[in-house]
Image: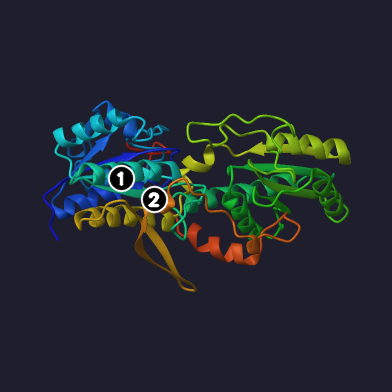
């Protein structure tokens, strides 16, 4: 297949250790088909400002793409801009499509999560309504692993590898003292607990940490948590709790907020800047149990630790970028490439396409069958699901003892 076209690609939402691998896959595949690859700075917000760049100039060769593949954050910059309803604000769409026409764009690819798929769904719908020939394809990305329509999402595997490794190392550190203590590790995850669940892989280090895992999908009372930790301390010196930032009480309130507290939301209606679950639980357990406690918040390290990226994750991210380009070249629009798991032993996947309108703004949560009955751990099925996604190591290019990265355009 050859394709004499111009592909415009953007990145949106929170970065991951794999989002630039998807970009590299887009650029590499576009060039292999004979198409031009251009980038929009800061996502659709940059497109509104006609802030685009020819990637042939900034990423000229295979070496630059390989370095991009191992670079954290979003090379093109990001945004959290929510497109308005087309009927309420048609002028915004008319402006965007005038820019696409003036730039001679044949396809728009947008690398992002749930909200980015909302953007692609809206642009695709307007394009159909306006009779535009431009194709719109989403490319999945999120460390939260909460996208519908795909077995898992690029970015999750690398973040899961970092979380499991960090919990294992923190557990070792917390176990050196001859006194009872509790460590609470706060893990990203607003409404879905995939990342906190991935901490179960840390148990292969022989210490059995984490001892408890709290997920947004399984609300737990603070009294039940205290009693569970009390029981564990009767048998062992150190207890490690991995808690999603979105962990909730049975009444639905977030553990990081007072039961009646209001939570600030972003433009898409998501809880914004959640943090404090670990600190709250550490303080609670210390007061109720009279033992030493500590809270560690892994924070943004979970999404930018490219030095610990999963080779499986980066390979699949790049592959999905290529699938997206080939889908656009074949005339597809309003779709998102998706991963289909064919087996675990050996691990095998295939790639297909999902309707982006079915993905946009939906949230895929951890199945109840993969959560322990008391809501404070995951099952072996969860571990079997996530284990292949963290496999393989990537050897960064080190200069003067530190990894070398591509300088971002943002």
Quadrant of residue 397 within the rendered picture:
top left
Residue for point 28% across, 28% down:
91
Quadrant of residue 235 within the rendered picture:
bottom right
Residue for point 58% across, 42% down:
190
Judge whether residue 16 can be spotted in this image: no
Q: Position of residue 217 (x, y in %)?
A: 64, 51
Label 1 crowd bin: few (<14), some (14–19), many (20+), radius 10 Å: some
Q: Position of residue 143 (x, y in %)?
A: 49, 47
Q: Which residue is mark 2?
A: 357
Residue for point 24% across, 29% down:
95
Mark carried by residue 2? none
Which quarter shows the C terminus? top left
Q: Position of residue 358 (x, y in %)?
A: 42, 53
Q: Secondary structure at mark 1?
A: helix
Q: Secondary structure at mark 2?
A: helix
Q: Which residue is mark 1?
A: 125
Which of the two residues, 23 or 224, is positioned nearer the viewer here? 224
Q: Residue furthest top?
A: 49
Find the distance from the CA under tag 2 to the CA under tag 1: 9 Å
């Amino acid at each position: 297949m050859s394709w004499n076209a111009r592909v415009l690609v953007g990145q949106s939402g929170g970065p991951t250790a794999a989002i630039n691998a998807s970009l590299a896959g887009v650029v590499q595949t576009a060039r292999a088909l004979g198409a031009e690859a251009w980038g929009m700075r800061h996502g659709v917000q940059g497109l509104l400002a006609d802030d685009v760049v020819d990637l042939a100039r900034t990423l000229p060769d295979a070496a630059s793409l390989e370095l991009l593949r191992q670079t954290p954050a979003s090379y093109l910059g990001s945004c959290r801009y929510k497109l308005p309803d087309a009927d309420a604000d048609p002028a915004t769409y008319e402006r965007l499509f005038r820019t696409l026409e003036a730039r001679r764009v044949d396809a728009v690819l947008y690398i992002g999560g749930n909200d980015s798929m909302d953007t692609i769904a809206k642009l695709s719908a307007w394009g159909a309504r306006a009779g535009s020939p431009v194709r719109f394809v989403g490319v999945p990305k999120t460390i939260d692993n909460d996208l519908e329509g795909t077995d898992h999402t690029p970015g999750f595997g690398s973040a899961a590898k970092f979380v499991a490794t960090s919990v294992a190392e923190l557990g070792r550190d917390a176990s050196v003292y001859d006194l009872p203590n509790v460590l609470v590790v706060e893990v990203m995850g607003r409404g879905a607990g995939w990342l906190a669940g991935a901490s179960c892989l840390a148990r292969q280090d022989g210490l059995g940490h984490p001892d408890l895992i709290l997920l947004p999908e399984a609300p737990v009372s603070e009294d039940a948590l205290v009693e569970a930790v009390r029981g564990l301390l009767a048998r062992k010196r150190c207890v490690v709790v991995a808690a999603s930032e979105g962990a909730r009480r049975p009444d639905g309130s977030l553990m990081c907020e007072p039961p009646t507290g209001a939570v600030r939301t972003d433009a898409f209606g998501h809880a914004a800047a959640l943090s404090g679950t670990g600190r709250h639980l550490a303080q609670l357990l210390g007061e109720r149990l009279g033992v030493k406690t500590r809270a560690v918040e892994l924070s943004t390290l979970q999404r930018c630790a490219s030095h610990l990226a999963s080779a499986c994750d980066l390979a699949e991210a790049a592959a999905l970028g290529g699938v997206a380009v080939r889908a656009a070249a074949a005339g597809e629009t309003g779709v998102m490439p998706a991963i289909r798991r064919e087996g675990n032993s050996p691990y095998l996947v295939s790639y297909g396409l999902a309707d982006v309108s079915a993905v946009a703004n939906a949230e895929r949560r951890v199945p109840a069958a993969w959560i322990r009955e008391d809501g404070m751990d995951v099952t072996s099925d969860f571990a079997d699901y996530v284990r292949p996604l963290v496999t393989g190591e990537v050897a960064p290019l080190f200069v003067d003892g530190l990894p070398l990265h591509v300088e971002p355009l943002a």
